[in-house]
Amino acid sequence: MTMNAEMPHGQGAAFQEDQAADGSRSAATVPQQPSQGDALFPVTPAPLSARPLVLVTRGRVEYLAHCPNCRDWHRHVHLGNVTGPCGTEYELQPKSGRRAA
């Protein structure tokens, strides 16, 4: 392999080692750093939540909410952790300013 204008100065040996390792023409590899707590990407995903609209029917109170996954409207009969018809589990949280005393 010859040094030419495609290879930046000082990367010739590293590029040859990368090419010799797997036999393909790959770019110089970036060293992987060990993750330290995963500050940007937490291990546990944040829980999904939705703010429901109160729907008063003739026999009961229902809660109407946009599903955080499929963005469709789902009806529920209680607040808290619910499972929508699409299979998504999320939490229905009431608006903080309108709680009954």
Image (cartoon, helix red, strand yellow):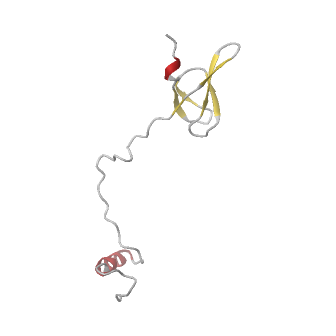
Q: Position of residue 100 (x, y in %)?
A: 52, 12
Question: In the picture shown, does residue 30 fall above or below 97?
Answer: below
- Of 81 and 98, the residue lying toward us: 98
**Residue lying at 40% horizontally and 83% vertically, measured from the top left:** 6
Q: Position of residue 53 (x, y in %)?
A: 61, 25
- Of 63 and 20, the residue lying toward us: 63
**Horizontal side of residue 84 vs 57, given as left or right:** left
Give residue 2's quadrant in the image: bottom left
Q: Position of residue 94 (x, y in %)?
A: 52, 23
**Horizontal side of residue 43 vs 75, given as left or right:** left
Q: Position of residue 72 (x, y in %)?
A: 64, 36
From the image, which quarter does the N terminus lie in?
bottom left
**Horizontal side of residue 41 vs 78, given as left or right:** left
**Residue lying at 69% horizontally and 16% vertically, measured from the top left:** 57
**Residue lying at 63% horizontally and 20% vertically, measured from the top left:** 62
Give residue 45's quadrant in the image: top left
Question: In the picture shown, does residue 86 fall above or below 35?
Answer: above
**Residue lying at 59% horizontally and 32% vertically, measured from the top left:** 84
Q: Outermost residue toward the top? A: 101
Q: Report the number of numbered marks.
A: 0
Q: Outermost residue toward the right? A: 58
Question: In the picture shown, does residue 50 fall above or below 55?
Answer: below
Q: Outermost residue toward the front? A: 97
Q: Outermost residue toward the bottom? A: 2
